[in-house]
Image (cartoon, helix red, strand yellow):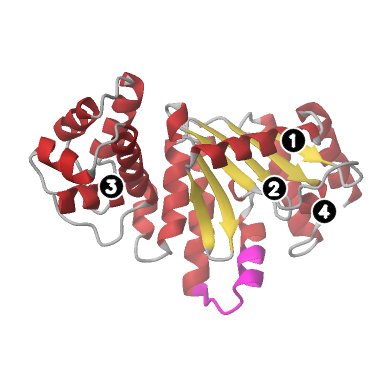
Amino acid sequence: MTMRNQPTARQVRLGSELRKLREAAGRTAKEVAALLGSSSAHMSQIEAGSSGISEERLRRLAAHCACTDEKLIDALVVMATDRTRGWWDDYRGVLPQVNLDVAEAEHHAAFLREVVITYVPGLLQTPDYARAVFSYMRPELPESELAPRIEHRMSRRSVIEGDNPTPYETIVHEFALRVRVADRRTSLRQLRSILNEIEQGHAAVRVIPADQDGFAGAGASMVYADGPVPQLDTGLRDAPTGVVFIDAVAQLQRLRTLLRRVEDASLDPVASRDFIHRLAKEL
């Protein structure tokens, strides 16, 4: 198969999962390559995500590694053979690869859960709100680069608003709802847009009040994307170098624990909806 110069996060994840299968079986890349009639160099490329793998070879690899989890194997086959071109591919070469990776991760998630402290979640942002955030964070961007970022962010909303929407739950801190990234009108439209998403059933929103005791989760922002099987869950967190994709078992467990703690500090969905209504009236 053709070598990939810049594998996507999903392709890298597939390679990582295949490496986990091999290591769990106690086999070296050279041993597995020999069983597949390949080379250790090619096996390393597959595990790095820079080369693909056919369904036949993937199933043989799983058999040689004594993996009997059929649901996991089938899910890996889908990852390896899916050639669907997503809407985000239109932005290849226009936006950084990580923007496309985030959209692809959201598209393939079985369930999306998000925690945000400082900004309204990207999936719920209005165009004016997104423009204000991008313009502030990257004031050097010309309109020719700013506009595609806004368009891409709005297109991401299709994952919760489309014909086959992905269930989406988000926990938002009161600060994110109150801060005026632009002006009063932009903030009011943003709050009304969130309420509309709630009413349309596109999002389940929970709010953490600013006066909530015992909440020390200022750094809790994250996205948790459920995979087709638990082993393929993915965590996404912001870092100084950009979005980090998390798939290590221990780290995913930590994120799930953090999610539960943050949820315990939030209002239930009905109380949260009423809370947002009150904020909108205050504006």
Q: Earlier in the sequence, mark 3 or mark 2?
A: 3
Left or right relative to 122: residue 191:
right
Q: CA distance from mark 3 to mark 2?
A: 31 Å
Residue mark closest to the camera, 3 vs 2: 3
Left or right relative to 254: residue 261:
right
Disc 4 element: helix
Mark 1 residue type: Arg
Disc 2 element: loop
Disc 1 element: helix
Q: With respect to residue 221, does 169 lie above or below?
A: above
Q: Nearer the viewer, residue 212 or 164?
A: 212
Mark 2 residue type: Ala
Q: Main secondary structure of the magenta part?
A: helix
Q: Is residue 86 visible?
A: no
Q: Nearer the viewer, residue 240 or 78?
A: 240
Give the residue number, with chain letter if any, for mark 4: 178
Look at the image and say whether residue 132 sits in the magenta stretch: yes
Q: Which mark is residue 47?
A: 3
Give the residue number, with chain letter if any, for mark 1: 261
